[in-house]
């Protein structure tokens, strides 16, 4: 049996049985954009993000499959997500898709996360990476963020121009 991990913002199963991916991360790298002054995530104060996993099992045996999916963060931190599954029916030579919606996935650290899929005594695994990107501070100059006073002066100036233009017309 082989496991392939796909990661996206979300997955949905269509009426036809096909799987629709929204916001696919083809390189399996998730980048969390955080303000420059935000604290680092920790086990006690993790960040959260909504993600979907599609676990494609191929070359599986025929019959019903029972098991569990676990998400393991880097640095030996505790499991951040798990989901049991039961009774997935598999035909000979067919593949099985397991959809996992992580709402939210708790992120205690940046790094490589492991997706363990246990089926009976077999443990299959795949990985994805979480990176943290620090955003520069937002522009706060008065020109960038007009105050109500600036807006009011602009409105008064445009009304005055219109009045002058209508008075000068014959």
Image: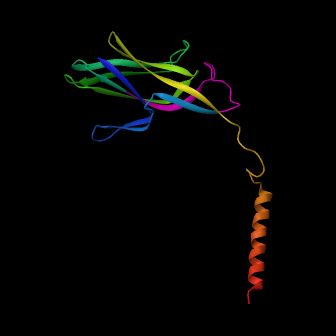
Between 154 and 121, the one lying in front of the other is 154
* Residue 76 in which image quadrant: top right
Q: Is residue 161 above or below residue 113?
A: below
Between 120 and 37, the one lying in front of the other is 37
- The residue shown at (50%, 17%) is 79
Between 77 and 134, the one lying in front of the other is 134
State which quarter of the image contains the N terminus: top left
Q: Position of residue 35 (x, y in %)?
A: 67, 34
Q: Is residue 27 above or below residue 14?
A: above
- The residue shown at (78%, 79%) is 164
**Membership of 45 in magenta stretch:** yes
Q: Is residue 13 above or below residue 2?
A: below
Q: How is the image coloured?
A: rainbow
* Residue 125 in which image quadrant: top left
- Magenta residues, as a range? 35-54
Q: Position of residue 130 (x, y in %)?
A: 53, 25
81 on left or right of 54? right
Q: Is residue 109 above or below residue 156?
A: above
State which quarter of the image contains the C terminus: bottom right
């Amino acid at each position: 049996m082989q496991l392939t991990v796909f990661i996206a913002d979300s997955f949905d199963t269509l009426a036809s049985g096909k799987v629709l991916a929204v916001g696919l991360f083809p390189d399996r790298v998730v980048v969390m954009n955080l303000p420059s002054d935000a604290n680092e995530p920790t086990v006690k104060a993790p960040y959260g993000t909504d993600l979907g996993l599609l676990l494609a099992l191929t070359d599986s045996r025929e019959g019903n499959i029972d098991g569990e999916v676990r998400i393991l963060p880097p640095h030996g931190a505790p499991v951040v997500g798990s989901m049991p599954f039961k009774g997935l029916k598999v035909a000979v030579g067919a593949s099985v898709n397991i959809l996992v919606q992580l709402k939210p996935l708790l992120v205690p650290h940046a790094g490589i996360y492991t997706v363990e899929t246990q089926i009976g005594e077999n443990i299959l695994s795949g990985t994805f990476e979480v990176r943290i990107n620090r955003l520069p501070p937002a522009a706060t100059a008065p020109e960038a963020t007009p105050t109500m006073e600036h807006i009011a002066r602009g409105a008064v100036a445009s009304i005055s121009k219109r009045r002058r233009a209508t008075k000068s017309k014959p």
